[in-house]
Amino acid sequence: ARTVRLILGDQLNPQHSWFATVDPQVVYLMMEVRQETNYVLHHAQKVISIFAAMRAMATELRADGHRVHYISIGQPESENAMVENIAKIVHSLAATHFEYQEPDEWRLDALLREYAAMAEASGTHASRMVSSEHFFTGRLETRQMFKHGKRWLMETMYRQMRVRHRVLLDSDGEPEGGQWNFDAENRKAWKGDPVEPIDFRPSHDHGVLWKEIQAAGVKTFGLPAANAIRWPVDRVEALQQLDGFIAHALPHFGDYQDAMSREAKRLFHSMLSFALNIKMLSPREVVARVESAWRSGGVPLPAAEGFIRQILGWREYVRGVYWAQMPGYESNNFLEHTADLPEWFWTGKTHMACMSAAITQSLEMAHAHHIQRLMVIGNFALLAGLNPTALHAWYLGIYIDAFEWVELPNTVGMSQFADAGGLATKPYVSSAAYIDRMGDYCSGCRYNKKLKTGADACPFNSLYWEFYERHTPKLGHNARIGMAYQQLKKMDPVTKEGLMEKARELRADLNRL
Ligand code: FAD
């Protein structure tokens, strides 16, 4: 029986059990299609890097003796819907079976499920979905964990995962170091010492591929930087990047996890999200390598634990939230925010130094680290009342690691509180003080971080108070933000009205900022 097996652009795991044996009756189908380049406006580096990695994987599979049918972006078939191409290939090969790995995105899952059901019903061929063999948890496992009204908490799941997978446990099954979570120790600002490690990622000239993408008329944004793209194309490169990270950055990851600096854009982050999300690297191997780096004495426990929590905890947890909430999660808008994204979200040209730095960096590198995404860009968006669905499209397009299953809960849930606190226990907002404490953006900014009103006042300051004030009916009872509401209550009416007026004036014309 001849079988067609689909490999999606974010399923580039050459270690999948599919590839353990070479079977001439199996044809692997990979395609660069407009359906995938167009569902949102993507950063140029994202399209280039995914296609480059897909091509590298096809080459590797062929070298190992597998049969691969590859549709590239320049071919007319790239204009077809994905399922149309599948049907054609299955038909032309007279295949009796179609197999695919579970898609991570609800949209593709629904499309392929529907296609499989139709093919089955019409007797064309049999279909089967198999595991992608990537995550620690199954799609609906997290929902099971939190059934019967149990409160959804990342920490609860994380501890269970530590126990189940025996990660950072001592011989009695207790957490190493006597505590599960060292987050409180991970909040230092960075003053230039230790120095930022060298960039341990590869560099590629993808100029030819970029020309092909452009010739096909694919629309993108952000700087292509096609002659020096720093994202890995295969496992060898991804593993080298992992090694570089563990040796040079991980020892300081914990301390400076929340730090921001205009001088150091990567700081001590791994930049591994791309390799992980397209499944070039397995989260299990990353966690195991980090744990063994700690066991061999090269890395402090808070750094190893902090990093492992991001992968074993947060990454799995947000995936669980996604599958528990889809479809429909993308249109959540608890706070009824409707403002358009300011034009400078597409250029970085704003006078706010922090926003300008974070957006410009995102446009240049297709990457910003977590605190820039959450406490600068997301913070502003929430305070300013930007439409969370539009913001979701922006985040989904701009970041190299943006795939809906991980981007959507982070944006709509964690960062915009649009799911009414399903993911975050309180809105992640701050005034200028936090941004100034954690980074160096405020010095040299056109706005004054200390001022709340007047032409030079940092917009974050008045927006912060007006955000709480205008959402009193929805947030006023949240015990975790009781302090802010107490302060608002104590504020003298004239000061308060000045802040409200200033914020309303700012929100009336966000493009001006
Ligand atoms: P590191 O700081 O080195 O962290 C290591 C790894 O932990 C990451 O590679 C990632 O796999 C995982 N991780 C860390 N935080 C999270 C998190 N909150 N959720 C899931 N995994 C996490 N991450 C994405 O992978 N894709 C996205 O589209 C995405 N969108 C985001 C949108 C917003 C608004 C926010 C606040 C966060 C988003 N994140 C997203 C989470 C996080 O910011 C990125 O995973 C991280 O910045 C990637 O860079 P890194 O590999 O250097 O991460």
Image (tube, helix red, strand yellow):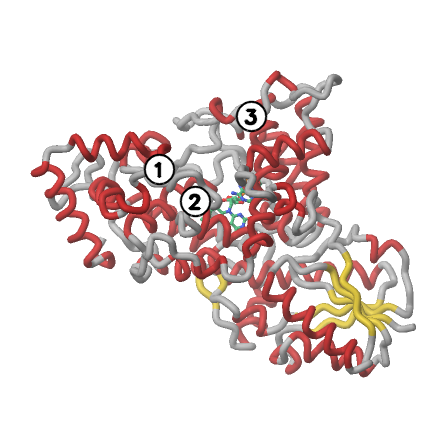
Residue receiving disc 3? 181
From what the image shows, is residue 399 above or below residue 251?
A: below
Q: Give the mark nearest the N terminus, 2 or 3.
A: 3
How crowded pointer 2 is (Cα within 10 Å; few <14, some 14-19, many 20+) is rated as: some
Choose top left, top right, bottom left or bottom right for residue 490: top left
| Front-most of residues 147 and 28 | 147
Give the SS element for disc 2.
loop
From what the image shows, is residue 158 above or below residue 296?
A: below
> Residue 359: x percent and y percent?
38, 51
Residue at screen point 80% across, 78% down = 90
- Eye-nearest disc, 1 or 3: 1
> Residue 475: x percent and y percent?
32, 42
Give the SS element for disc 3.
loop
Q: Which amino acid does the dot numbered 3 rest on?
A: Asn
Residue receiving disc 1? 478
Are the residues at dot 2 and dot 1 in contact (C-beta closer than 8 Å)?
yes
Q: Answer left or right for 67 relative to 435.
A: right
Residue at screen point 34% across, 51% down = 381
From what the image shows, is residue 485 above or below residue 330?
A: above
From what the image shows, is residue 419 above or below residue 118?
A: above
- Mark-to-mark CA distance, 2 and 3: 22 Å
